[in-house]
Image (spheres, rainbow, N blue to C red):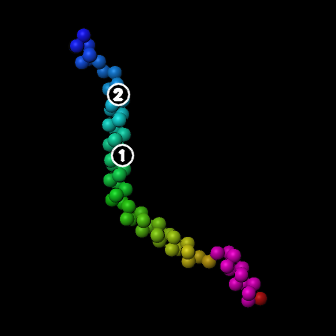
Amino acid sequence: MLRKWFKDEEGQGMVEYGLIIGLIAVVVIVALVALGPKIREMFDQVNEELDAIPSEGAAEAATNAGA
């Protein structure tokens, strides 16, 4: 009976999947920590460029004010 319990492999696949998912999570966290500043810089640059573009409503108001 004890030998059967030690040879029982049910659930082994689930443990392996859990380990793989854990490893993937660690890799993703490390990548985000390493690339985080670069990603923030990229989004800040895009935000600044979008802020520099005048909106259509502001352009219309400027055109109508000059007419």
Q: Is residue 28 magenta?
A: no
Q: Position of residue 44 (x, y in %)?
A: 46, 70
Element on which disc 1 rests: helix
Say which residue label 1 marks. Answer: 25
Spot occupied by residue 35 in the image (x, y as percentages of width and height): 36, 60
Report the magenta residues as a range: 55-66
- Name the N-terminal-most of marks 1 and 2: 2
Residue occupying image coordinates x 24% and y 18%: 6
Disc 1: CA contacts within 10 A as few (<14), some (14-19) or many (>=20): few
Q: Which residue is mark 2?
A: 13
> Which residue type does callout 2 highlight?
Gly
Task: Give the camera-side residue of 52 and 2.
Answer: 2
Looking at the rendered image, the quarter that the C terminus falls into is: bottom right
**Can you name the residue that lies furthest to the left here?**
3
Residue 59 colored in magenta in the image: yes
Residue 4, percent across and down?
26, 13
- In the displayed structure, does residue 64 sit left or right of residue 42? right
